[in-house]
Image (cartoon, rainbow, N blue to C red):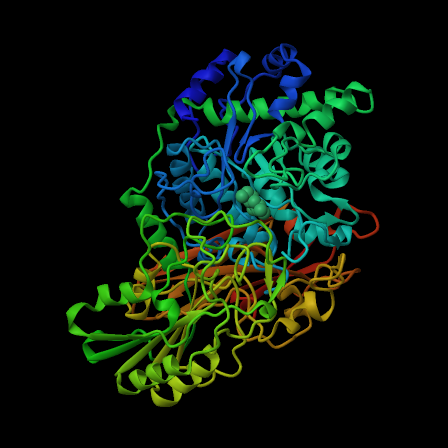
Amino acid sequence: MKYKLFILSILTFSILFTSCNSDRNQSIGDTGSDEVSEAKLDSLINLMTLDEKLDLIHASSSFTSGGIPRLNIPELVFSDGPHGVRHEHGRGWYALEDADDEATYLPVGICLASTWNTDLGYDYGEVLGNEAKERGKNVLLGPGINIIRSPLNGRNFEYLSEDPFLTGAMGVGYVKGLQAQGVAACPKHYTANNQETDRHNIDALISKRALHEIYLPAFKDVVQDGGAWSIMGAYNKVNGQYTTHHEYLNNTVLKGDWEFDGVVVSDWASVKDTREALLYGTDIEMGTELLRDFNNPVYAEFYMANPAKEIIENGEVDERFVDDKVRRVLRLMHRTTALTDHGPGKRNVTEHQQKALEVAREGIVLLKNNGLLPMDKTEIKTLAVIGHNANRRFAGRGGSSQVNALYEITPLEGIRNLVGDDVEVVFAEGYEPYYDESLFRGEGGDAASQSRENREDVELARTANEDLMQEAVDLAEEADAVIFVGGWIHGHEGMPWGQGTYDAEARDKLNLKLIFGQEDLIRQINTVNDRTAVVLMGGSNVEMENWLPATPAYLHAWYPGMEGGTAIAEILFGEVNPSGKLPMTFANSHEDYPSHSIGEFPGDGTVDYAEDIYVGYRYFDTQNKDVIFPFGFGLTYTSFEFSDLQVTKQEDKVIVQTTVTNTGDREGAEVVQVYVHHKEPSVGRPIRELKGFEKVELEPGAAATVNIELDESAFKYYHPEELRWVLEPGSYEVQVGNSSRDIKLSEEVVW
Ligand code: BGC
């Protein structure tokens, strides 16, 4: 389906196209140019038979929903994914060989969130929108905005944060940047898809308060502030009902309270019941558990195809429910095509690769530095780069977010490019991935591979390799400095993406222990060379107590995208001053997290979110529990001072003003984080909650005054019995700092 054809077909609507809103500061819909009159939609719907209407609300191939050729209404074309437009499937369920689908591979979602730079969120969406459009896609299945509840969730790398405010702020930028290109965002997975184990059936038991304070706000933000044109339901249940057709979540909250007029797309095969899907808000059914034969799919068998026809014709469900879905689908089609100056899109252009680099530079987090970094290449003759991940490419794996990257610069390549011929770089793999089923939770065979590299003939169970370890330690001993690159991986060569993975769909990690013998390896390297910097990849942290104390420097790189190796090298050698901040708390063990110590993970049939609103730092800080690195933390090569906090209350908002000064001797960026705390609440409330932030870039010696506005909602809580947001009168502390554990200044404000 080519984009031009799509535009032509939609002209049937006889809609007058006006100007486009590509200004990042305006919310979608401001100009009215993307709105189509309801009367026009109704007259089009009146022309349709029931069969035709149903064709529009279920899949017609792996990544398209149906069109109506008789009325020149085209199919909608979907694509994953959150950090790069996924490889082509054609109409089938397996990756196409030799497709023209190489794409920009951006750093993953959690790396984007670590930038705390909302402009980059917009730019990121803009890159994806352009590449999706160039490939003829109408809906991009992202951003992933589920809250990071446990560090073990296999998809944390795709998500943004443990904090709803940060998730919402970054998600809104992404959605606006994407949709300004005429491609619909599809924020996912709505909602409480916080684990992969038993994801198709697990029933998350969550209080209304936790839903509204923790799990729903980011979705509300991307709908109301971002103007998302579609949203994806999740696989799991919440409080007894499947989220994809959830009466409360879809009808009451999303389409009722939030006035969402877009499309609820199912996750692939998340519809489980025709009647519920018709009544409780599902608008398009994609994928289905009813599809037994991937080679001969019969789309008419989908829940929202023939079975829907049957119960409408027998009067069980009124046809107007279908009409509402069709209206939404047509509205989405209009929105993705009507804005005339969207242009043709572009792919694999230098500016996209440059954006991937910028996000990596700002998203990689420096967590420890005893003075080893930045390294000075003129002082190093031999540099040992050690670790399998130094030479590994990540784009093609991780599940549905896989990307056929145009290229991917590994850390080893990035380091070699940067130091050039002046430094001898020696490499040792140090450890090798091996497959051990007992290291995972979840369904190994789920979602059989669609990977073009899927080979079965690999040896899956090897143990840590003593020879590789010895070779690496010997090299480390001889070198002037060592860069160790390790951490998590998405999966194993030759394995289906749903199997043998750590950061990927359908599996959760079993614990946070460093895999493949890396902990031993780092410890041994530290004993022979005290100039060792550790760089870890991964969608979460690892246990650190046994290796961090003796390690001079540690950089967390997440999965930093196609230019990740360049950014890692630039930070290690001081060409870039790190400014990333953790979007999740790094505690030592998964057992320390409230989802494990108070609530359940992964549960058994049901999972009790007994920690309630105390997720991440809301728990660690309120309970004063030790963590290794707190939420919002990240080091830099310069230093900053916060001063002159003024908190001014106006009628319905509070203005927080503070001055940040770069007191060091090099340019850098700091994130001003604003937390709010009610001093004597009548119900339990966290000791602090993030309600505003801003990243400021400053020359050495320079100062900037930052103004952050907090509206009333920043001070409200969701009343557990009255089931509504309440602004409780009283005295609030407004805390300003550069991590949740480093509050520099605070002032009181009274409501
Ligand atoms: C994933 C979604 C994805 C969809 C389509 C599902 O398995 O949960 O995130 O967008 O597949 O690939």
Q: Residue at x 16, y 73 (%)?
A: 422
**Ligand 1, what quadrant?**
top right
Q: Is residue 629 left or right of residue 343?
A: right
Residue 744 placement, left or right of 355:
right
Image spot of residue 720 (x, y percent)? 80, 53
Question: Residue 36 location, x and y as percent?
Answer: 55, 19
In the displayed structure, 160 sits above or below 10; it is below
- Seen in the picture, residue 597 relative to 681 is either above or below; the reply is below
Q: Depth check: give the residue in front, 265 or 43.
A: 265
Q: Nearer the viewer, residue 142 or 363?
A: 142
- Which residue reaches farthest left? 421
Q: Is 459 rendered above or below residue 202?
A: below
Residue 44 visible in the current orientation: yes
The structure residue drawn at horizontal position 82% and vertical position 24%, both measured from the top left corner, is: 316
User: Splitting the image into 4 quarters, where does residue 732 fall?
Assistant: bottom right
Q: Which residue is farthest front?
A: 457
Which residue is at the front of the view, 41 or 118? 41
